[in-house]
């Protein structure tokens, strides 16, 4: 059985800055920043949705059998 780290790691402000700053710079540098921002948000929401679906699939797979 593989050990699972159950303690969440908190993101720090500097972690977020390393992601947000380049993204904001790229969005602002485009000819159509609003369209670029909406596209970035669509990708983000899609990733969140896929992660949610994968988590639900795992829960469904393992529910009822703790040794699977």
Image (spheres, grey):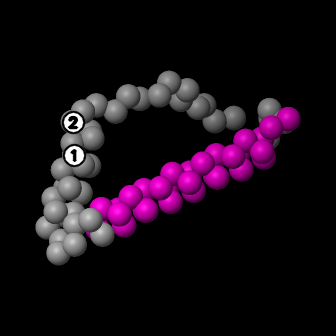
- Cβ atoms at labels 1 and 2 below 8 Å apart: yes
Q: CA distance from mark 1 to mark 2?
A: 6 Å
Identified at 84% across, 36% down, the residue is 65
The residue indicated by pointer 1 is 18
Return the residue at label 2: 14
Q: Quadrant of residue 26?
A: bottom left
Q: Is residue 28 above or below residue 4?
A: below
Helix, strand or loop for disc 2: helix
Dominant secondary structure of the residues highlighted in magenta in the image: helix
Which residues, given as a range, are shown in magenta?
Answer: 36-64
In this rendering, would 38 be left or right of 32?
right
Q: Is residue 63 magenta?
A: yes
Answer few, some or many: residues within 10 Å of disc 1's Cα (few below 14, many 20 plus, some between 14 and 19). few
Specify the quadrant that holds the C terminus. top right
Q: Along the horizontal axis of the image, is 15 left or right of 1?
A: left
Q: Residue furthest bottom?
A: 31
Q: Which quadrant is home to the N terminus?
A: top right
Which residue is rendered at x = 41% and y = 29% of the image?
9
Q: Which corner quadrant of the image does residue 67 belong to?
A: top right
Residue at image point 80% right, 32% down: 66
């Amino acid at each position: 059985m593989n050990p699972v780290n159950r303690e969440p790691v908190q993101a720090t402000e500097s972690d977020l800055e390393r992601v947000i700053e380049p993204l904001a710079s790229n969005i602002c540098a485009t000819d159509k920043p609003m369209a670029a921002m909406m596209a970035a948000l669509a990708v983000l929401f899609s990733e969140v949705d896929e992660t949610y679906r994968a988590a639900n699939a795992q829960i469904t797979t393992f529910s009822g059998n703790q040794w699977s």
